């Protein structure tokens, strides 16, 4: 059997398992067994999916996920990538690096990189205790825990982490204690004061009836989505009113805010409007704070012809709402083929194909719907992570394993590379230059 056939068989088996988990409602960012096989050599990217990314202060990109290596470099669940050189770097000191389990969220604040997820140690190999949240000092090159006294972190998984308008970090997940070791009782959400370096509970949060799936700052309040299919609005004090009335009839997994409009993505078929009527809006919806009403995103997102699509992540850049999820089609009046990654044009209220090509999107050799798990867009530069091994687009196919970059200003797709690949390209260009001179 050829290596290509073995690759396809391997990937099909993995993706069928992954697709089943996604359809069952599991968070695809937390699927830990999907990994690139060593027999296929170093992947063009990372060896497992990316959960989140952030742009660094010097042009670098920081990534977290379930990977253990990127570009052939060992990097435990968190890594630095330099697009200019193709260099991948682990984050650690001494003989340690990264984390001892996967991370799902990353923030950069004043040259401090914060990561959160399922891990209990940082600087794996020369470990320190760091219960599900840790920070890395970019200047000192050191990991540290977030806590006071003899405690740190939280006692169960973190699903989401944001920085709010008050400068504090808010995390949500399954946990019931913060500052483990010297614990403080909390209910699935907690606040870390970056100045005082203290954990605190949020008054009234006992009203939350499920795990916290995602949090979104919206001016002076927080939007909080829970696993019991509720979206709360928290503006301080002890009041947690619902966003609505009405809303998605299912779980919300992502938010994006554009002025007075709040976009919600998740796993649902319909939205309930304020008058009690229901509208088909698979995967996504918009709440208008101006008129206090819910609206569909066109005809929504679909897997094949009968299964509703799921949105895993949202990111707004200018007039574009970038959508990552599990789907094959986005519906206007007619369907737009959208393979796990789509764009909603805010000004027109329409889905549109990327780079003008309705065949564009992630590809995995399987009958399952393509899945993008994360998207981060900034100044026309888009980072997309997911379960794919190549991207089909208007100019052909780009090999890209679990990670790809899209430049909206030029409609170009780029796979991450290893430093060796960049060196080989430089040698190739140098030979071409010498040939021209001769």
Image: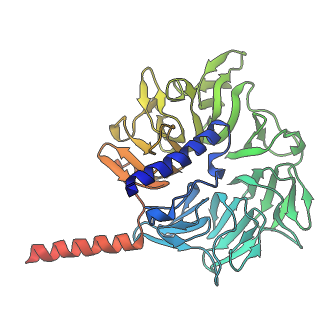
Look at the image and tell me whether residue 410 can be seen: no
Lateral position of residue 270 relative to residue 390, left or right:
right
In the figure, 125 relative to 231: above or below? below
- Give me the residue at 70% from left, 30% from top: 250
Question: Where 93 sits versus 371, above or below?
Answer: below
* Quarter of the image that includes the N terminus: bottom left
Left or right side of 70 for 30 = right
Colouring convention used in this rendered image of the protein: rainbow
Give the x, y percent position of residue 354: 39, 40
Between 178 and 339, the one lying in front of the other is: 339
Judged from this view, the residue extending furthest toward the front is 1
| Depth order, front residue of 178/58 | 178
Q: Position of residue 12 (x, y in %)?
A: 50, 46
x then y, percent, for residue 280: 60, 20
Decide which of 399, 429 is in the foreground and name it.
399
**Outermost residue toward the left?**
438
Q: Which residue lies at the image location 70% right of the left edge and 60% below the top edge?
A: 116
Q: In this figure, what is the number of numbered marks?
A: 0
Residue 166 image point, x, y percent:
74, 55
Residue sitting nearer the eye, 48 or 217: 48
Q: Is residue 23 above or below residue 32?
A: above
Please tell me whether residue 215 is drawn above or below residue 421 in the rendered image: above
Task: Name the quadrant of the C terminus.
Answer: bottom left
Q: Name the image quarter holding residue 157.
A: bottom right
Residue depicted at 52% across the width and 40% down the height: 323
Residue 412 shows up from this direction: yes
Image quarter of residue 206:
top right
């Amino acid at each position: 059997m050829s290596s290509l056939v073995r690759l396809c068989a391997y990937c099909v088996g993995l993706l069928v398992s992954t697709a089943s988990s996604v359809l069952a409602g599991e968070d695809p960012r937390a699927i830990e067994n999907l990994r690139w096989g060593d027999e296929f050599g170093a992947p063009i990217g990372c060896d497992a999916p990316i959960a989140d990314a952030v742009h660094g202060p010097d042009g670098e990109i920081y990534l977290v996920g379930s990977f253990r290596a990127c570009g052939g470099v060992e990097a435990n669940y968190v890594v630095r990538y330099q697009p200019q050189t193709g260099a991948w770097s682990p984050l650690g000191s001494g003989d340690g690096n990264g984390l001892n389990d996967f991370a799902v969220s990353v923030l950069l604040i004043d040259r401090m990189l914060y990561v959160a997820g399922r891990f209990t140690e940082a600087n794996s190999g020369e470990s320190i205790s760091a219960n599900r949240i840790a920070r890395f000092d970019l200047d000192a090159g050191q990991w540290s825990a977030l806590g006071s006294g003899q405690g740190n972190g939280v006692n169960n998984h973190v699903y989401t982490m944001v920085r709010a308008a008050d400068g504090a970090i808010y995390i949500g997940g399954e946990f019931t204690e913060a500052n483990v070791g010297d614990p403080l009782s909390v209910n699935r959400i907690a606040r870390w004061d970056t100045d005082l370096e203290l954990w605190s509970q949020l008054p009234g949060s006992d009203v939350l009836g499920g795990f916290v799936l995602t949090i979104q700052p919206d001016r002076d309040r927080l939007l909080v989505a829970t696993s019991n299919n509720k979206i709360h609005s928290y503006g301080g004090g002890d009041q947690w009113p619902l966003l609505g009335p009405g809303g998605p009839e299912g779980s919300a997994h992502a938010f994006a805010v554009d002025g007075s409009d709040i976009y919600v993505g998740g796993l649902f078929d319909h939205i309930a409007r304020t008058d009690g009527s229901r509208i088909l809006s698979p995967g996504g919806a918009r709440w208008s704070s101006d008129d206090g009403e819910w609206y569909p995103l066109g005809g929504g997102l679909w897997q094949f012809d009968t299964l509703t699509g799921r949105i895993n992540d949202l990111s707004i850049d200018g007039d574009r709402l970038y959508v990552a999820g599990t789907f094959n089609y986005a519906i206007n009046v007619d369907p737009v083929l959208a393979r796990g990654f789509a764009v909603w044009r805010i000004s027109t209220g329409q889905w549109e194909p990327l780079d003008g090509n309705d065949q564009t999107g992630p590809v995995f050799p399987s009958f399952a719907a393509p899945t993008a798990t994360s998207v981060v867009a900034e100044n026309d530069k888009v980072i997309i992570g997911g379960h794919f091994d190549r991207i089909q687009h208007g100019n052909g196919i780009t090999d890209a394993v679990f990670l790809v970059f899209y430049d909206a200003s030029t409609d170009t797709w780029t796979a991450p590379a290893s430093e060796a690949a960049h060196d080989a390209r430089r040698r190739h260009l140098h030979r071409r230059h010498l040939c021209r001179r001769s």
